[in-house]
Image: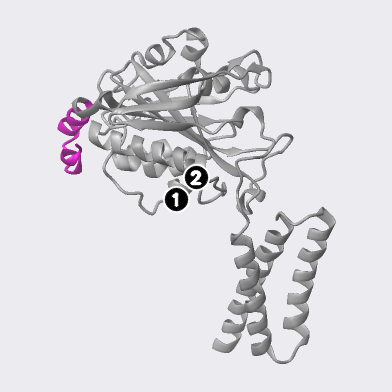
Amino acid sequence: MTRYFGVGALSVIVSLMTIWAALAIYYSNLPGEYSRLGLATLMVLASLAAFIFLPRRRRTLVWFLVVFAGIVVWWTTIPASNTRHWEREVGREPYATIEGNSITIHDIRDFRYRTEKDFDAVYYDKTFDLTKLDSADLIAVYWMGDAIAHIMITFGFQGKDFITFSIETRKEQGEEYSTIKGFFKQYELIYVVGDERDLIRVRTDYRKPQEDVYLYRLRGGPKRVREVFMAYIRQINAMKQKAEWYNTLTTNCTTSIIGLMRITGGRVGYDWKVLLSGYTPLYAYEFGALDTRIPFEELRRRSYINPRAHAIGNDPEFSRKIREGLPLMDRTGRQQAEEVSRVLGLPYATKVQ
């Protein structure tokens, strides 16, 4: 019985390895779609033949592992690039220059839309005073039910200036997104740094159908907020120098979850909500990272910003006005963190700096 179980388990493992190798070959940078398809098919057929017809299974397994290891080594060397024919929305890589507490971010996106695909591609540079950075907000965007969302983080500077980071796939012209292809180095990664009038309003006003956007204030003191902000700054500078791959599972917009947990002084635990990005706000709420003085459903309802985004339009005061009356938005930094800690009596919250 044990022998049959072992053989069955080995067969499953080998099958999964074969499928991965075949897909890695097919979705690779090798020239010619038919050539890639032929090599991927050959990989599958060779694995089947080896384990069905050859009598010396142990030797066959060794050879299979050698071939598989070779494919893995080759696949890991496929380089990402910053020089392709990109879609206009992701045409520039932002970067920053640092002079003490002055952080100048270059190529901040601020598109002027007529429709989702008809816009003027406007960028600007802006200098931020790190000593004035005192808040961080979570933006959750929904377009296909509650389970899947796009997550963005906005950093606030004393309620006057705001800058948003959005982790996205960097698609080439004419390229369509595929979840499966996202596992196999088909898309580069980009951190879009943008004005909220662009990154929020393109989703609430111009995409058809419109997407549902929620804005939540994160609990966390200025020190932690600044640490996470600088981590983002270092990341965009690193990616300006060396491109990185997007991955459907490991390197995507939900990477922001790690950042928001760091803002509140916590760690990402093992929870199914981490894998389903749409439940990121609920996960953050249960962790104590949002305003837990009110039930989550009420917080979610009050954090829905589509109607006010429509009303405010392209007002230069968009970021300030969009926050008026939202939970915790009248508190920043240590003040709001200490207030929530006092109300809730959360032990860990006293450690927020």
Q: Amino acid at mark 2?
A: Leu
Q: Is residue 252 visible?
A: no
Rendering coords of residue 279 (x, y %): 45, 40
Mark 2 residue crowding within 10 angstroms, few (<14) / some (14–19) / many (20+):
some
Image position, residue 315 (x, y; %): 47, 7
Question: Residue flagged by tag 1: what amino acid is it?
Answer: Trp
Residue 270 lies in quadrant: bottom left
Give the residue at mark 2: 276
- Residue at 79 percent of width and 73 percent of height: 45
Q: Quadrant of the N terminus?
A: bottom right
User: Are the residues flagged by discs 2 and 1 in contact, CB closer than 8 Å?
Assistant: yes
Q: Which label was assigned to residue 272?
A: 1
Query: Is label 2 in a helix, a strand or a loop?
Result: loop
x and y percentages locating residue 26 in the rendered image: 74, 58
Magenta stretch: includes residue 152 = no
Q: Position of residue 323 (x, y in %)?
A: 37, 17
- What range of the chain is rendered magenta? 336-353
- Any part of residue 160 in sight: yes
For the point 25% across and 26% down, which residue is it? 131
Q: Is residue 229 above or below residue 22?
A: above
